[in-house]
Image (cartoon, helix red, strand yellow):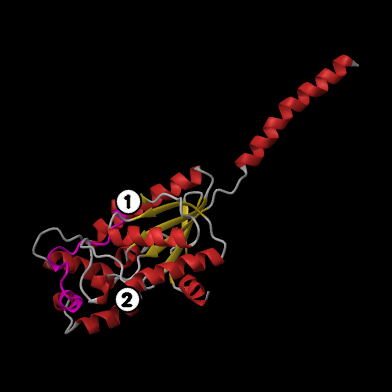
Amino acid sequence: MKTYILLIGFMLSAFVPTTFAQKKDAKDNTVTLYITRHGKTILNTMDRVQGWADTPLTPAGIEVAEYLGKGLKSDGIIFKAAYSSDLGRARQTARIVLDTKGQNEMMITEVPQMRETCFGSYEGEFNPRMWNDAALRLGYKSYTELMADLEKDPTLMKKMVDAFAALETLGIGEPYDAVKARGQKAIREIAEKQAKNGGGNVLMVGHGMSIGIFLSDLDSYGKKPNAGHMGNAAVCKVTYKDGKFTLESFGDMSYVEKGKAK
């Protein structure tokens, strides 16, 4: 009898760890990225070019970041990690969002690769000047004509960004493919790291034009973002599982609207 009991005990001790291991392996490690544009800044308000140039959030910019935090909180979204561009407006937005939703102690990791596109000598210039120059280079009469076509043909974005880089005079403007390469590398590294840590929600705060470029062909199933303007504090939701990205939403202002209604 004693031998029999010992044998049963041995079998159970061998079986239990295996069962737990199987459960652990089966755990869903899906990563959900909430990729967000920063709040409104001084240069945004003045309608001036703001790439690597940086200005702080205006009172309205702080308010919209707070609305975003409240909206995310109302949906019960808890972040496992937070990242931002190393530019102040993105870092400031990320801090406000986390503090507003009650995650005050969460650290923010700054990622230079998440920066906005560099516009070289156009930095700080009025937006219509840069856009008109690019439109003329591409054979349009004005930037309004270019924008009308961009709404119908998102592939024009690459030509437009490349025109900015070709026309600026400092020699530091970034072409489209360079922006896309650095941003997609950063997104993949962040997603893979979080997947290894068990998945979960991740906040990423960046910039309007570069986010659109990063997400242009990131979706593993061919889904592309629209070319429309991305509002301040808009959210692009991307899921990552088994090495594949899925674009769930682009430029979503519903979290801001929920927060505003609180």
Q: Quadrant where the N terminus lies?
A: top right
Q: Which residue is depicted at the point 18% across and 64% down? A: 119
Q: In which quarter of the view is residue 133 placed? A: bottom left
Give the structural element (helix, strand or loop) at label 1. Answer: loop
Residue 153: image tag? 2
Q: Which residue is depicted at the point 16% across and 61% down? A: 173
Give the structural element (helix, strand or loop) at label 2. Answer: loop
Residue 111: image tag? 1
Instruction: Determine the residue located farthest toward the left in the rendered image.
Output: 169
For the record, the magenta segment spans 113-132
Q: Are marks 1 and 2 in contact (CB under 8 Å)?
A: no
In x, y percent, where is residue 48? Answer: 20, 73
Of callouts 1 and 2, the N-terminal one: 1
Left or right: where does residue 253 sit relative to residue 186? right
| Residue type (three-letter) at the residue carrying disc 1 | Val
Left or right: where does residue 73 sit relative to residue 228? right
Instruction: Determine the residue located farthest toward the right in the rendered image.
Output: 1
Q: Is residue 131 magenta?
A: yes
Which of 71 and 158 lies nearest the eye of the viewer?
Answer: 71
Q: Residues within 10 Å of mark 1 (few under 14, many from 20)?
A: many
User: Could you give the CA–CA distance between mark 1 and mark 2, rounded to whole angstroms?
Assistant: 31 Å
Q: Which residue is depicted at the point 35% across and 68% down? A: 39
In x, y percent, where is residue 209? Answer: 30, 67
Which of 109 and 179 lies nearest the eye of the viewer?
Answer: 109
Q: Is residue 18 magenta?
A: no
User: Can I make out residue 68 in this image?
Assistant: yes
In x, y percent, where is residue 156? Answer: 27, 72
Vertical order, 77 against 2 (above or below): below
| Residue type (three-letter) at the residue carrying disc 2 | Asp
User: Can I make out residue 225 in this image?
Assistant: no
Q: In which quarter of the view is residue 235 placed? A: bottom left
In x, y percent, where is residue 177? Answer: 26, 58
